[in-house]
Amino acid sequence: MTAPSVIITGASRGLGRAAALLLARLGARVTLNARTESALNQVRREIEAAGGRAQAIAGDIREPDVSERLVAAATLNFGGVDAVINNAAMIQPLSRIADSDPETWRRNLDVNVMGPFLLVQAALPHLRRAPHGRVINVSSGAAVRATHGWSAYCVSKAAINMFTAVLALEEPDITALAVRPGMVDTAMQAELRECGRGAMTPEEYQRFVESHRNGALLPPELPGRALALLALRAPRAWSGRFIQWNAPEVQALVAQSFADGD
């Protein structure tokens, strides 16, 4: 069987990096994307040093040509696209609706919604031909829980959930999932602690500060492992769902995969 080809955005750090490293370890060929070329190439070198296959395509996922280049590179070098993980996202503006900068609000939607749309649209012809084409969209609890000062982020993640549901309805030959990764120890969490004090309520802000202080944030490798296994093995019957990274059925899939020797 040909090793699967997976495109993953936001792959230079945090959750995306963790998922990319595990995908390569499991035998997938990975096409990495992020804006920062140096950090992205570092992940590529880590994968190659461990015996995996990877290529790095730097660029802003808001731009249509970046999605086209990612798909073209995956097709040329790895024979196609079997799965896409839309992980790149931004949380700014951290401000209340009345005070938000419209351009930053628009940029949030461009990154968090239009980026996944553009990449999926570019990859769909290949995903339809793949034996088990999959789209894994990284969502958030913010999709279903409003938070002071997070207007753009909450709206964008709610949109990603509906995008996933419509994609599953329109494309019955692929599997589309929106995944809630939980509170992960990433740069986005650091940004919340640094910039969120005036936008969130004091109680909400303190919850994030205390979670970090108490070591309650998840290491990226845990939800990253779920993302990787879902990209490779999510059952079609799950398509369209918004699912928690540690839902019992997801953890059963992960446990079974490693029991099989992966």
Image: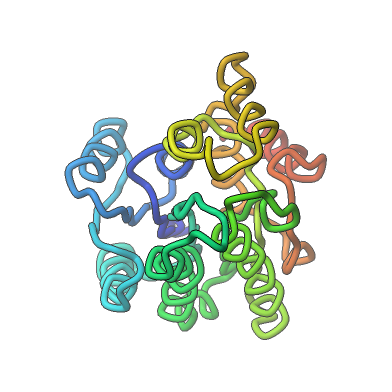
Residue in the picture at 35% in, 70% down = 62
Residue in the picture at 23% in, 49% down = 36
Residue projecting furthest to the top: 214
In the image: residue 90, left or right of residue 63: right
* Place of residue 49 in the rendered image (x, y in percent of width and height, measured from the top left): 25, 32
Residue in the picture at 46% in, 55% down = 93
* Image: 113 above or below 251: below
User: Quadrant where the C terminus lies?
Assistant: top right
In the image: residue 82, left or right of residue 178: left
Residue projecting furthest to the front: 98
Q: Quadrant of residue 35?
A: bottom left
Residue projecting furthest to the right: 248
Residue nearest the observer in this picture, 203 or 12: 203
All told, the count of numbered labels is: 0
* Place of residue 106 in the rendered image (x, y in percent of width and height, measured from the top left): 43, 71
* Place of residue 127 in the rendered image (x, y in percent of width and height, measured from the top left): 51, 74
